[in-house]
Image (spheres, helix red, strand yellow):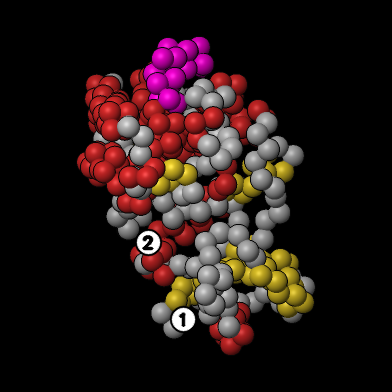
């Protein structure tokens, strides 16, 4: 149930009926877990057999075939010793998902860990773990046909970029020529980066299952090592460079305060270098892939900004133009220092 803007919560009957399907021992405590989507109720369950996280999936994310696909990935990774919260099966048929009253539920063994601390050690280990993720799933096969779309060379992104300027509220716009100049730069740069990537032979690079959303918020750390990777709902079939270029961006990008105009334009080069070397330590990056990384990072930034700005005129709480201009500055920096970035593995 839900009240107003409150987080979705389990009813007492719903929770009791669901938990009756699991053999987790005598329950001693149940507490609400307030992280993640507000539309997905979660509780931490403590029992004499251990500690668990139980959740109801968001309605838009509970397609059974897709859930089964992500569970197959997680079960495969768990069997290989990959760090992730293990799924708990139902007691009667050991099913990794529970379907009841048109809802889908999941139970996980609870993993204790903390957030990303920004250290080079944690950054290196995140890159290493993504390299391991790709290696373990390189030949993974399943019956489900996963999605293949990405932020690279996508018409939907181009359309979003072109509509950004017109959807920014008039009161939030700078002078017309300034707005159009930024919009034109972002539009042309997205296409130019896509062309450069394709010229490197992108279409000929093998495709495999990738995570699709590799960023600090989707992993937990302990002693500066990754102890759990979560959220497999964006998993898809793509060239692996799509994943590790975005991962490198997410760990090296620098934000700031309430005004994007004050955010630094440069990346944290030490973290970028550490992240790429972490990946390369277990899954060697080719020269062509490395040459594509800065261009892909630009595409990823543009895509992440353009989609919400074209839809709402803003980026969350940030002024749409201010955020788009910040992206322009960061993209210019990456392209200016392209050669320095692609040499980090030399």
Residue pictured at 57% horizontal, 78% vertical: 10
**Residue 202 x/y as whole percent:** 28, 28
Under circle 2, the secondary element is helix
The answer to whether residue 240 shows anywhere in this view is no
Side of 140 where 273 appears, left or right: right
Q: Return the x and y of residue 65 as percentages of the image width and height.
A: 35, 65
Residue beneath the point at 44% across and 20% down: 333
Q: Tell me, yes or no, whether the two marked residues, 2 and 1, touch with CB atoms within 8 Å.
A: no
Give the magenta-colored segment's residue range: 329-346
Observer-nearest residue: 325 or 22?
325
Q: Quick one: label 2, few (<14), some, or many (20+) residues within 10 Å? A: some
Instruction: Please state if 247 lies on the left or on the right of 189 as rendered.
Output: right
The image position of residue 13, as x and y in percent, is 58, 87
Q: Residue at x 40, y 21 (%)?
A: 332
Label 2, on which residue?
Answer: 66
Mark 1 neighbour class, 10 Å CA radius: few under 14, some 14 to 19, many 20 or more: few
Based on the picture, tell me whether residue 192 belongs to the magenta stretch. Answer: no
Foreground pick, 326 / 55 = 326
Total marks placed:
2
Residue 313 at x, y percent in the picture: 35, 48
Q: Nearer the viewer, residue 99 or 76?
A: 99
Look at mark 1 in the image and give the residue it sits on: 100
**Camera-side residue: 142 or 12?**
12
């Amino acid at each position: 149930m839900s009240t107003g803007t409150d987080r979705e919560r389990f009813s007492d009957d719903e929770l009791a009926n669901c938990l009756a399907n699991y053999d987790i021992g005598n329950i001693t405590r149940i507490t609400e877990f307030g992280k993640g989507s507000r539309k997905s109720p979660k509780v931490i369950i403590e029992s004499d057999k251990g500690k668990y996280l139980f959740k109801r999936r968001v309605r838009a994310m509970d397609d059974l075939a897709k859930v089964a696909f992500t569970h197959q990935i997680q079960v495969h990774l768990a069997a290989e010793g990959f760090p992730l919260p293990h799924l708990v099966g139902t007691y009667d048929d050991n099913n990794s998902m529970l379907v009841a009253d048109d809802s889908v539920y999941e139970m996980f063994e609870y993993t204790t860990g903390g957030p990303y601390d920004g250290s080079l050690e944690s950054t290196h280990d995140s890159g290493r773990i993504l390299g391991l993720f790709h290696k373990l799933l390189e030949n993974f096969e399943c019956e489900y046909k996963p999605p293949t779309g990405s932020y690279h060379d996508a018409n939907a992104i181009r359309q979003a970029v072109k509509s950004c300027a017109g959807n920014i509220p008039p009161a939030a716009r700078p002078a017309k020529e300034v707005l159009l100049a930024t919009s034109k730069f972002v539009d042309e740069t997205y296409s130019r980066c896509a062309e450069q990537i394709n010229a490197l032979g992108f279409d000929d690079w093998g495709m495999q299952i990738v995570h699709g959303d590799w960023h600090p918020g989707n992993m937990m750390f302990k002693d500066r090592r990754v102890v759990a990777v979560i959220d497999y709902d964006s998993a898809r079939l793509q060239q692996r460079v799509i994943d590790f270029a975005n991962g490198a961006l997410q760990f090296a990008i620098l934000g700031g305060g309430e005004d994007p105009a004050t955010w630094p334009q440069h990346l944290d080069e030490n973290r970028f270098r550490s992240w790429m070397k972490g990946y390369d330590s277990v899954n060697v990056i080719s020269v062509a892939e490395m040459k594509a990384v800065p261009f892909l990072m630009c595409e990823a930034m543009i895509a992440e900004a353009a989609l919400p700005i074209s839809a709402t005129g803003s980026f969350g709480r940030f002024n749409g133009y201010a955020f788009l201009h910040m992206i322009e500055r960061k993209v210019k920096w990456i392209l200016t220092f392209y050669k320095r970035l692609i040499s980090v593995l030399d």
